[in-house]
Amino acid sequence: MSRTRTALLAAMALVAGATGSAIAAVPGDAGAAAVPCTVDYKVQNQWDTGFTASVTVTNHGAAKSSWAVKWSYAGNQKVTSGWNARITQSGANVTAANESYNATLASGGSATFGFQGSYSGTNAVPATFTLDGVTCNVDGGGGPTDPPDPTDPPPGNRVDNPYDGAKVYVNPEWSANAAAEPGGSRIANEPTGVWLDRTAAINGAGGKMGLRDHLDEALEQKGSGELVVQLVIYNLPGRDCAALASNGELGPTEIDRYKSEYIDPIKTILADPKYASLRIVTTVEIDSLPNLVTNVSPRATATPNCDVMKANGNYVKGVGYALNKLGDVPNVYNYVDAGHHGWLGWDDNFGASAEMFKQAATAEGATVADVHGFIANTANYSALKEDHFSINDTVAGKSVRESKWVSWNRYVDELSYAQALREKLVSLGFDSKIGMLIDTSRNGWGGANRPTGPGATTSVDTYVDGGRYDRRFNTGNWCNQSGAGLGERPQASPEPGIDAYVWMKPPGESDGASKAIDNDEGKGFDRMCDPTYTGNPRNDNNMSGALPDAPISGHWFSAQFQELMKNAYPPLS
């Protein structure tokens, strides 16, 4: 589709005003085929006197050995620092030139850089961008002039909800561990995710099944009906930058290894026609993109590793590449990790994270069409639904939002968060049919201590604390939580907008070691897994709430499994 310059500039003004993102203008009435380049400028965070922005340039012309993007501000914006480009400014005119490590810009290739700036009054986005002197066009992630990914399969090849009318794969390795536990046979046949958490897992490591082994077993389980296989894609460079327990094998700069040694082999296997009858659900890179919003400077929760990953752009590139490549397989359904309400539910995290998801979903050749949905609460403990208090309650003259537990969050549970995030993502350009998954593997919080009604109305804190199911010290606690229980059993279409409740994290597999343990899996020791740890800014300096004597992440933890069964809600029969 083509547009006139007038119509395009009008659309640009509307989008810029509504979303803080810019559409670069094109002269004349140029169709998508004639577009020499696209530039996507997004304001990610903004406060009274400053802002941060991300810029992605995509080259549709001949390959370049160096590049420079230029634009002009209409106001008094000043760039104060930048990353992934050498940024200079003269008056209102800004030039962003490549660094030595990202100088090559292939035909069809993209480069992403970012910066922090200051302003006063209004922070209008630039109207026009050039790449090496040539005016660029729209990069709106699926907008009218955004060329489609030629390898995207026809939409009709996928069903709206892959879980509807389908069985879900039971991992025989996890099932055997569960069945070997006293009482474990009650849940040993529940479906769980298969974690591809290092390159060796693709072919099988330490005597375990590889990806083809699981897919072959899935064909056996499938029979004549439909079957979903759940895979966790989890091996980004510099993985899990805000924690240590699940650090991975790839260093922060090893994006090329991630692509060629990890994603490409996975795609090759999934694209084998032998597996075309399976519905393959991928959970794409948990604990990654939200870190680029919440755990970077100037936040008090910032970590040096997350600052590095935001600066080099490899989380965004890695997620985009995975979505693009895996999304090319017609029977693959990509669900992007979306954190949980106790991480992203605050006003300054919610919208910025949604924008970050959009940025990744339109990076490295991916489009929003490569995203079938999002998954919340993966490997976490946030309660599905808090019945005894709501965000609208007022007690003793104070809103529930003012309680120590809620702490001004907009959401009190995963269901309300997931449904609201879905609406936000659709408003940013994701398909109106995207669905949410919620991991309920460890968020039941049952047992004798489960509240049966609201707390005392003496104060807003007694009201919330006495009625909440989630019994953690703080929603920032994530490692082997004491008192947790199995949650809702996996099921399809349980609520509007929710494709399924899933057990993506296999219950009984440790989140991390409670003390330092040597291992060959690249996994470190994180004090949040130490039951004696008194906390940090990411959990408001509370005790960690972790169980003692835990093995390294991903290894079987019998004591945790027994506690999850004991505190299951709904209870186990």
Image (cartoon, rainbow, N blue to C red):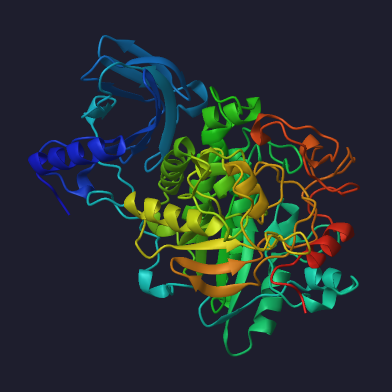
Residue at (42, 21) in percent of width and height: 116
- Is 244 positioned to the left or the right of 66 in the image? right
> Looking at the rendering, in which quadrant would you find the N terminus?
bottom left
- Nearer the observer, 199 or 166: 166
Q: Quadrant of residue 41?
A: top left
In this picture, is 187 found above or below 303? below
In this picture, is 367 found above or below 180? above
- Is 436 positioned to the left or the right of 16 in the image? right
In this picture, is 78 found above or below 122? above
Coordinates of residue 220 in the picture (x, y in percent): 69, 83
Count every numbered label the image shows and give the total: 0
Coordinates of residue 181 in the picture (x, y in percent): 89, 70
Q: Is residue 345 visible?
A: no
Extreme residue toward the top, this view: 90
- Nearer the observer, 113 or 420: 420
Residue at (74, 37) in percent of width and height: 244
Extreme residue toward the bottom, this view: 224
- Nearer the observer, 385 or 210: 385
> Looking at the rendering, in which quadrant would you find the C terminus?
bottom right
Coordinates of residue 313 in the picture (x, y in percent): 51, 34
Coordinates of residue 547 in the picture (x, y in percent): 84, 48
In this picture, is 367 found above or below 353? below
Q: Is residue 502 visible?
A: yes
